[in-house]
Image (spheres, rainbow, N blue to C red):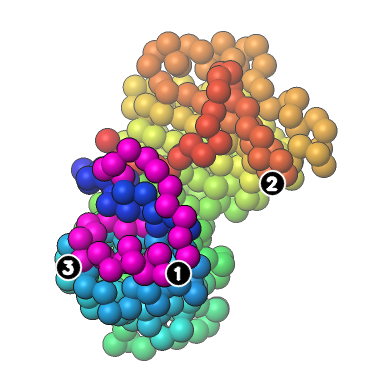
Amino acid sequence: MPLSWTIRTPRRDYHLDFFAVPLEEPPYRLTMDSSGLASILSNAFQFKRLEFDLPYSTCHLLSGKSLTLLRSFSGRLYPEDLSNMLDNAPILSELEVATFPGQLRIESTTLTKLKIYGLLAPETFLSILRHCPNLTHLLCVVPGCARGCVLAHHLITTHENLRALEIRGPNQEPNFLTHLRLPNLVALNTHHNPTELRPFLESHPWQNHILELSTRVTVSDHAGQALQKDLQRVPHVEALKLYITSGVLTPTFVALGSDETLPLLRRLEVVFIGQYCHDLDYNRILETLDHRTGTLHTFRLVLQVPSQSNVYAPLVWRPRKWAATGFERLMQDGMSFRICYEASDTGKMTTWPDYEVDPGENFELSLD
């Protein structure tokens, strides 16, 4: 079952920006002020999907509206308006919302997919899990606990249905994760590095269930073995996305070159983020990929490096002839392969092999 956030349901009744378009009709634009918006929202009881792309100052217009058919909502809401909307949307299953922490309360037995943008305290994060028992996908922003903070033992939370968890936020000690029991989790996306996640992974046998993993790597030149051991704690991962923020690439590919590291890996994406990559060794990368021929189906390397502070960066990232020949051989053997250079200061993207790239293309992992 795909763990993508893509929603494959009938098209939206309305997309509300500073205009509204009934998408079943030939496209037209209706410019409106608050009174016009209020008039459209008077039919809210008919909406099945609603994108409310409007300022927070207008979200009160949803207050008290009966949303009996609403299944999917996306927009900005104050915490009190969000709670009110949930009370009036009895079959809402998909929610993507930007909000303020405040007195945030999200309680629903119908929600299955939730994306919430707004810094959450660890206690609020755990509360959402406790009060939304049917969630299968959850994305949220949690800063983590400062080192040494302690959460009460009664906050330990078990969630039987959650399959995909994405946590964004400052890279602090993630010890609040040890308060989770997620027996059916198969996809984990976090900004913490594997070493910080070790207590979280070691404390549960379900680490063997994780099939998708996205994490940050901050290893030094000599820490490839530590990364290798960390990745071996999730032996059944089939899709892996690594953000390299330490300035070096080689330790990651050394770790992935071992027979004992992720033997079932099918999809690999490595995103390097930094001022300059000092060890861009395509021969080492080719050696690792050759070692995984037959199991690895997809490889992406994304280099997010500024172009203006280092004038040579846009010139040296392309593979030289010997490595390029090896990569072409892998593609002929059926591997989906791409190297992307993304100038982090200008947003310009170029690729090898050369072809057009949509800047908004989604590189998120999802299982077939």
Q: Which mark is residue 274?
A: 2
Find out whether the residues at labels 3 and 1 contact each other: C-beta distance under 8 Å.
no
Q: Which mark is residue 68?
A: 3
Q: Tell me what residue is drawn at x 50 percent, y 68 percent.
A: 55
Q: Answer with mark 3 or mark 2, whichever residue precedes in sequence.
A: 3
Query: What stretch of residues is rendered in magenta?
Result: 23-51
Q: Secondary structure at mark 1?
A: helix
Residue on which disc 1 sits = 34
> Which tag, 2 or 1, sits closer to the chain's start?
1
Coordinates of residue 32 in the picture (x, y in percent):
45, 60
Q: Residues within 10 Å of mark 3 (few under 14, many from 20)?
A: some
Front position among marks 3 and 2: 3
| 345 with respect to 110 (left or right) | right
Q: Looking at the picture, how far across and down is residue 71, in whole percent?
A: 22, 59
Magenta residue check for 278: no
Q: Residue at x 20, y 60 (%)?
A: 46
Q: CA distance from mark 3 to mark 2?
A: 48 Å
Query: Residue at position x 37%, y 16% from top?
Result: 334
**SS category of the residue bearing label 2:** loop
Report if residue 32 lies within the magenta region.
yes
Residue 80, picture quadrant: bottom left
Q: Is residue 77 left or right of residue 157?
A: right
In front: mark 3 or mark 1? 1
Q: Is residue 269 above or below residue 298?
A: below
- Callout 2 crowding tier (Cα within 10 Å): few <14, some 14–19, many ≥20: some
Nearer-N-terminus badge (3/1): 1
Residue 206 visible in the shown view: no
Name the amino acid, label 2.
Gly
Residue 19 shows up from this direction = yes
